[in-house]
Amino acid sequence: MLPALMRKTWRDDRRALIGWAVGVALFTVVYTSFYSQFQGAAELKQDALPQEMLDFLGIADMLSPAGYLQATVFSLIGPLLVLMCAITLTARTIARPEEDGGMELLLATPLSRTAFAGQRLAATGSAITLVAAIPLILLLIIVPRVGMDIALSHVAAAGVGLIALVWCFTGVAFLAGAATGKRGTVLAVTGVLAVTTYLANAIGGMSDGWQWMRWLSPFHYFIGTDPLHTGWHAAQLLTLAGVGVVTAAVGMVLFDRRDVGV
């Protein structure tokens, strides 16, 4: 049987989880199910915008199946949705009970601080992973049905990359919450980092002189290898997952040492 603290975390977050899951699922289904209808609009968009803007937005190849999926599901809105879910839910693991005054009661359980933080993170992380996996699951079903000429292994590579990206930022968000105990800090730090690194990846892809910036961005390791065209890149996926694991581990150490008023 799963630990009681994990079950309580899922129970407390169930409404938010259902809402995020439904939102991500609807977004994925709408964009992929109407692939053929969007082709005319996509062609107009490509004709109307300069090539530099198309490259920045990740929609330069929107007329191909792989380019369409990258532009709609994996370029901006899809990652934005799942990262918002990850950051807001991770902010609840440590920072929310601490700010709400309930941390003392939770820490009264016969668990070490490390075990407490680990179970909270495990519950939230598994729930976030499930939400992040929704696009992957749905695309594997929908892509063949709508006639997209793209290898499902490439779709799987991009979907797993999205999960790895979420793990990366989940670890960062947990570290910020465990170190400070403030939800505002978690949202600010992780949000600014996400926006900054997204821009770094986009700008690095547009200018030869700034290509080095891409290697500092988690988004490069997620989508910069173009998995929808080239398939699996294990080193990049492991890098994202590794950052998530290391930052989460540092967060647990800091939480164990920090004075939270007990």
Image: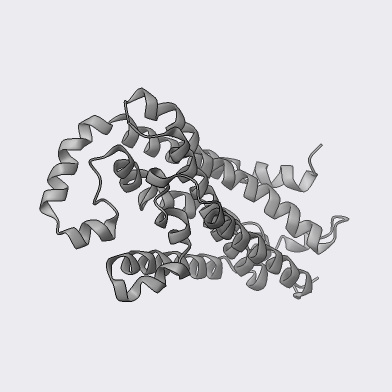
Q: In the rendered image, is residue 88 in sight? A: no
Q: Position of residue 41 (x, y in %)?
A: 16, 40
Query: Against 92, is 10 above or below?
Result: above
Whether residue 39 appears in this view of the structure is yes
The image shows residue 35 at horizontal and vertical percentages of 27, 33
Left-right relation of 105 to 12: right
Position of the C terminus by quadrant: bottom right
Judge whether 96 appears above or below 231 on screen. below
Q: Against 145, is 254 above or below?
A: below
Number of numbered discs visible in the structure rendering: 0
**Residue extending furthest right?**
110
Q: Quadrant of residue 210?
A: bottom left
Residue 260 percent coordinates (x, y): 74, 72
Q: Residue at x 66, y 43 (%)?
A: 10
Q: Is residue 143 above or below residue 209?
A: above
Q: Residue furthest top?
A: 145
Q: Kindly indicate the quadrant of the structure image that contains residue 201.
A: bottom left
Q: How is the image coloured?
A: one colour
Tell which of 194 and 238 is nearer to you: 238
Q: Nearer the viewer, residue 137 or 104?
A: 137
Left or right of 86? Residue 262 is right
Residue displayed at 80% across by 44% down: 3
* Lateral position of residue 17 relative to residue 72, left or right: right
Q: Position of residue 155 (x, y in %)?
A: 44, 39
State the residue in front, 233 or 93: 233
| Residue depicted at 71% across the width and 64% down the height | 249
Q: Quadrant of the N terminus?
A: top right
Residue at 12% across / 44% down in the picture?
A: 44
